[in-house]
Amino acid sequence: MYTLYKRVSPYLVALSMAFFFLSCTNTDNLEPEPNEVGSLSIEFEHLVGGSPFDLDNEYQRANGETFSVSTLNYYVSNIILSKEDGSTFVVPQEKSYFLIRNHTPETCLITLDSIPADTYTGIAFTIGVDSLRSVSDISKRTGVLDPAQNEGMYWTWNSGYIFFMMEGISSEAPEDPTGTRAFRFHIGGFGGYESATLNNLKDINLSIHHGEGAIVRKEKQPKIHLIVDVLKVLDGLEDVSLEENATVMFNPYSSVIAENYTQLFTLDHIHN
Amino acid sequence: MRSIYSLLFVVWIFITACNKPEVAPVEMVKGLDLPDHFPSPVYDFSANPYKEEIFLLGRDLFYEPKLSANNTIACGSCHLQSNAFTHHGHNVSHGINDQLGKRNALPLFNLAWQPIFFWDGGVPNLDLTSLNALHSPVEMDERIENVLIKLAEDEKYPTRFEEAFGNAEITSQRFLQALSQFMYSMISSQSKFDKVQLGEASFWDDELKGQALFEQKCSPCHAGVLLTDFSFRNNGLPINHDFERGREEITLSEADRGKFKVPSLRNIAVTGPYMHDGRFRTLRQVLDFYSTGVQSSETLDPLLQAEDTPGIALSEIEKTQLIAFLETLTDYEFIRDKRFSETNDDFTK
């Protein structure tokens, strides 16, 4: 009996290992349980062209001018995840407002929970804060929508959030009385309350081009890795002359910057 | 047979249970005296229901100079009760370090009925109005995050917030809701004009003639019991558009150039000087302007272009009669109501 065991045991080990690996693969591709939920994270990695982006570091534009950025903040909201068959999951609105702040790395990685277990191949979101929330009473403005907690991403005189803020220094910008060549983009405008006005709310739609989608399971938290090319704010669909547009806030030119920031984002890869 | 009774009993419980929620809407504005002759308010009281302790906290905050950067300017500095909460005698208000703004401080009353705020309509919700003055570099020049810190370090506010909200946490929601409660409670509805409407008083000769003129010449814009239609109109004031564009600054539409919110005329006799920049000191000057000073422009309100010369034709006698009527709009009970005063020792809750 003992010898039989001894002779068979290597096979047994091999067999059980095979089972083990098989069962692992099986778990991976296992159909999700009904009502199974998990979480998913999204990383916003900021680059300039192909180089890593750091605040206050000097970069060069296509036109040869140099610039550095001291502030880069923007709202990401109303996130929608899409599947291969075209169906979508809309993240509940109250959990769907994020303020990405480059100077605070933890804000550049956002986590969504209670996501139905599935495989997601696309993501859509809005840069900005939708008009409904932009006119709501103060009780609905918590977290990053709280004017006391959003680092000044809010206009009080013309009530509304600043969707996208980029400030910095450029050799191209006019010199101010203190000798600084600063540029300031404060882009907002949700379309107006009683009358229509600037609408710089921009929807971003990204999908995966190769490889598998983000597999959300109870025990698995995939990460969607986005690359955000800051250079495209200036050299985007239209080249922004900092000499002429060093300060862009609530004025018609802001729509040019807003069109440019639709070009910032690419879905680079997914970690499962 | 018994089962039929028990079934009926269950049905009865079900029906009575269903009936209960109907009383809820009245509860939402409990503690507030909404005038019967007013339309329904637009403020959503359900998000910020009235509570005496929150109102009292709001009043303290309204008169609190710590809301400004150097602790010198309170809301009440430019919104004086005796003038229906405007800045009497100041064409434009001076804020921190005596800096001047470019617009006349608006009076504060009946704010729960206002759909949109400020001369240019830049703010759509009462809760957000205080932030405007708080952050303005020529008014309080402060940041809300600093105000919340100053209040938390103050000896009285943590207790006051606890009394109002159940714990001492000081958030922007609570801070702004308390200010809103104080402001939405400022209801002005007891002028002679109101009492005539309710059959409790009657106009005398000039007031009566003034009322007839008002209805004919003014009430298309200064409409109804609130004495405004809340629209934005260009009334033909000569304006330097390099400096002031009115509603256009919010909408960026040239069609809104030189337009301002039609203000309510309630308490108008005590809220001078007049117009968005306070350029007229007296009601007579205002009526002189409407009769001979209205300037044509692309955006001048069509109602002021009905005659050959723009404006509203008025004889001197008619102006006197109109002023007699306008003076009936003053609500003395409101401007003396201790509930809204900074020094309110004789007001007990």
Image (spheres, grey):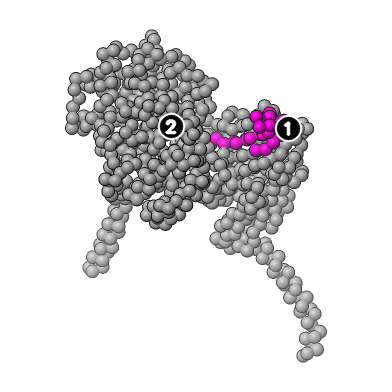
Residue type, numbered disc 2 = Phe
Is the C-beta separation of discs 2 and 1 under 8 Å? no
* Left or right: B190, with A172 as reference point: left
> Badge 2 sits on which subunit?
B
Real-space Cα separation, disc 2 to disc 1, in angstroms: 40 Å
Q: Residues within 10 Å of mark 2 (few under 14, many from 20)?
A: many
Rendered residue at 39%/10% (across/down):
B309
Rendered residue at 73%/32% (across/down):
A171
Could you tell me which secondary element the residue under label 2 belongs to?
loop
* Residue B268 image offset from top left, x and y in percent: 32, 27
* Residue B319 image offset from top left, x and y in percent: 29, 16
> Badge 1 sits on which subunit?
A
- Asked if B159 appears above or below B310 in the picture, the reply is below
* Left or right: B149, with A254 as reference point: left
Task: Find the residue positioned furthest to the bottom.
Answer: A1
Is A105 a magenta residue?
A: no
Q: Which residue is mark 2?
A: B118
- Asked if A218 appears above or below A164 in the picture, the reply is below
Q: Quadrant of the N terminus of chain A?
A: bottom right
Magenta range: A167-190
